[in-house]
Amino acid sequence: MLLTNHAKERIIKRLSKSRKCEKIYSALLNFLNGAEKIEVNNRILIFTDKRKSLVCSKLEGKKLSVSEIFEEVKNIDDAYECVFWGEKKVAKKTTPRKFLSEIPNGIFYFYINREKKVIYVGEEEPLLAITLRPAKRKERD
């Protein structure tokens, strides 16, 4: 799951209280563990714990092997926010090549946004968290 700047700020304010990438994603994972998933339509998902709701949109990710992902990012030298969403969930700001060396072999969904400098590699389809807001009445029931 990737975060918009707005969602990141909301998670910092409401959940993590820290600006470190690892702490933000750790707070997000704790929230998601106790959350219920609601599919609004084929593109929008809401995760709610009856008090707060995380609104997410599905992203178009490619399914590639780790070696194919390595080929996609081999020319990138800048630090990216890299997210691995598998059995072990990892989020850190580092170079993509260094990040991919820590990932186990296999076939994963891959999404990259060069403009925002974010990379997602994971077993589940990539999601973009849009906002964290108070739950609406129908989401509490």
Image: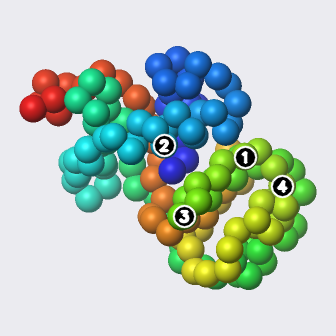
Q: Which mark is residue 29?
A: 2
Q: Which mark is residue 95?
A: 4
Q: CA distance from mark 2 to mark 3?
A: 12 Å
Q: CA distance from mark 4 to mark 3?
A: 19 Å
* Residue 101, x across and y down, in percent: 80, 69
Answer above or below: position of 49 versus 66. above
Question: At 54% across and 77% down in the image, what residue appears?
Answer: 63
Q: CA distance from mark 2 to mark 4?
A: 23 Å
Q: Give whichever of discs 2 and 4 has the lower sequence position.
A: 2
Mark 3, residues whose alpha carbon is within 10 Å: few (<14), some, or many (≥20)? some
The disc labelled 1 sits on which kind of residue? Lys
Question: At 58% across and 55% down in the image, what residue appears?
Answer: 89
Answer above or below: position of 53 versus 100. above
Q: Residue tagged by mark 1?
A: 92
Q: Residue tagged by mark 3?
A: 86
The disc labelled 4 sits on which kind of residue? Thr
Instruction: State yes or no: discs 1 and 2 in contact (Cβ < 8 Å).
Output: no
Q: Give whichever of discs 4 and 3 has the lower sequence position.
A: 3
Mark 1, residues whose alpha carbon is within 10 Å: few (<14), some, or many (≥20)? some
Q: CA distance from mark 1 to mark 3?
A: 15 Å
